[in-house]
Image (tube, grey):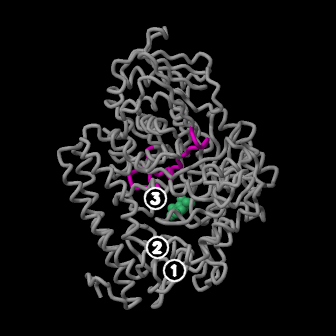
Amino acid sequence: MADAMWLSESVARRAASGCTFSVDVDRVGEDARSLRLRDEIVRRLGRPIVSEAGRANVRLVAGVTSFDSDEAFSIESHDGVTVIAGNTTAALMYGLYGWLRRRTLGGTPTDGRIVSAPDQPIRMIDHWDQIDGSVERGYAGESIFFGRPGSNVHAEFTGFPQRDETDAFRGDMDRVEAYARFLASVGINAVCLNNVNVRGLATNLIADPWLGRVAGIARVFSSFGVSTFLSVNFAAPMRIGGLGTSDPLDPAVRAWWAGVADRIYERIPDFGGFVVKADSEGEPGPFAYGRTHADGANMFAEALAPHGGTVIWRAFVYNCRQDWRDRTLDRARAAYDHFRELDGRFAKNAVLQVKFGPIDFQTREPLSPLIGGMSRTNLIVEFEITAEYLGHQIDVNYAVPQWLSMIHADTGRDDADGRPLETADYLRDVAVDPSRVGYAAVGNVGMDDNWTGHKLAQSNLYGYGRMCWDGSLSAGEIAREWTRLTFPEADGDARATIERILGTSNATYERYTAPLGVGFMVNRNGHYGPGVNDYEYDRWGTYHYADRDGVGVDRTVATGTGYTGQYSPRVAATYENLATCPDELLLFFHHVPYSHVLHDGTSVIQHIYDTHFAGAAAVDDYIAQWETLAGRIDDTAYENVRERLQRQRENAIAWRDQINTYFHRMSGVDDAHGRVIHR
Ligand code: GCW
């Protein structure tokens, strides 16, 4: 039986104990959702629903507020009666979970009113799940949606053998339902089921017979207010449609996609739309026909528009056949170079999805210059919850501090009153359709008992959802909430220990891995563990250029690749100038000698040694702190993290020693404190 994530049934029941509910959703015609809402109260909370509101002490009322948002809710309590109100049943679901969370955290005033509305209209999880049951960059077991044809994994979870070899679906709808509940409970409202690399039979998910199975999953999500998207293959008209071209301006191709969309919406009336990775890392796209990304995106937009659907077009486009010998090439420039000139040319129901940084979800990157560079385009900022570059859910890494720093970063643009716009507000400012902007993140769950492999990695999924809803929360507040909801049995000290580990974990990981924003010194392909030169002479465009004198990538306008020039003058000046460039991004923007002195007075080489020793030592400290929790938290969670911390320790030592030795050999400079650096 799978482990519960936050707000387990027993915790939720405790929060609702003694309450009687009434549900008034008559003015909202969303039957599946109101059934679900009632079911959540009766079955999950074990509480009765009474027909007369006057006899209930918790009253859920839809359709009576004047909120702008159909997802906003209010919770108002007076004299022992609580009214949860919103425009729609989905809003009531958020309200119910918000109320349960507040009750559990001890934050519900007995008298008073709170109103809560989401910061971002699109709050999405992208799955990189494949129909053979594997998950690209997944570290928590097989896909919760798809199962390997022919494997008995499928039979084990459904209780019946697969009907035929082409049935790629796992069919474990209890798991899907539990997942949908977790997502709804933190306010996620969209999910894409399959990997953006749409290979082989996955191309067929948009058509019968598989579409029917997709619809079954979509119905569960929809009942929780979550709409379903599919990733599609740009070349599908040729691969499965029998056409001789996939040219986005060809009328037959457009008609084919329109037909696909029509059939999907017959089955899934609230289908979200398509996610497309095109002309990226070998995936097909409009370039084959001399067309632009806007031509490609707008073709899908046209097919989806009659149904209210959205196409999400990824901006992760770069030359992955780069020649390392050519130092003028710079992968960081790619997204801006490709998409800036297309600003204003995307349809109203098209959204450009931009990774938060210009490279690829590294431990430290600046905000992508496209976020700030566009002025008339719907944008989604993309994050990666699955810990591809952040320790594979073996190393503890609560990444919320990093993501928050991205949504609060200065985009370099100003609002009408001349105040700098942070990411969240900027998205609204440049939207063509303000209901079509937001955040997406690659999910981190799988079939592992605890969903995320590392118990503490659940905090990232939770934290991402909370951040999408309320960007004003701090990383510490989110960690506190998650710890309390997840370890209800733990005493205050135990919880403080867990929060301390979470709160420092992202910085710790950064310390023992690649220094000062240089990035990508990872093991080739797998991306776990050190591989200082694994990408140095390769085609992927991610280099550190270390030599005997110095290290880093010169991305300045004055002497480098000119990348800094993609930012607005204010932001560009900060990065261009060695004196103002933040130390943590120094090697991202500049090639400097090892003797270069950082703002804290340490040289670059000494900083590398210091942080690598400190990072590895912090892991020993985590182990000692964790061991104090034995018997004070759930045993399974305790053992899971204890085991992962041992593996993290090995990883941290490998990083520390390889990085320190590499830079010692390169620079010939000894550690000022005489610690062991292997020769
Ligand atoms: O970081 C890279 C990953 C690929 C991924 C790609 C992307 C889905 O290594 O596995 O492919 O990003 O975002 O498209």
- N-terminal of the two: label 1 or label 2? 2
Foreground disc of the pair 1, 3:
1
> In terms of secondary structure, where does tag 2 sit?
helix
Query: Does the magenta-highlighted stretch encompass residue 23?
Result: no
Q: CA distance from mark 1 to mark 3?
A: 27 Å
What is the quadrant of the N terminus in the image? top left
Query: Does the magenta-highlighted stretch encompass residue 124?
Result: yes
The amino acid pointed to by label 3 is Arg
Q: How far across and down, in percent of the image, does residue 294 sit?
A: 75, 56
Q: Which residue is mark 3?
A: 137
Q: Which residue is mark 1?
A: 552
Determine if the C-beta at disc 3 is less than 8 A from ligand 1. Answer: yes
The amino acid pointed to by label 2 is Leu
Residue drawn at x 37%, y 81% as measured from the top left: 606
- N-terminal of the two: label 2 or label 3? 3
- N-terminal of the two: label 1 or label 3? 3
Residue 304 vs residue 549, the one in the foreground: 549
Left or right, residue 506 beside residue 62: left
Residue drawn at x 75%, y 46% as measured from the top left: 348
Say if mark 1 contacts mark 2, CB within 8 Å. Answer: yes
Residue drawn at x 33%, y 45% as measured from the top left: 450
Name the magenta segment's main secondary structure: loop
Tell me the magenta residue range.
Answer: 118-144
The amino acid pointed to by label 1 is Gly
Q: How many marks?
A: 3
- Count neighbours of disc 3 (C-alpha within 10 A) and say few if under 14, some if 14 to 19, many if 20 or more: many
> In terms of secondary structure, where does tag 3 sit?
loop
- Can residue 54 be seen by looking at this rendering? yes
Foreground disc of the pair 2, 3:
2
Q: Which residue is mark 2?
A: 516
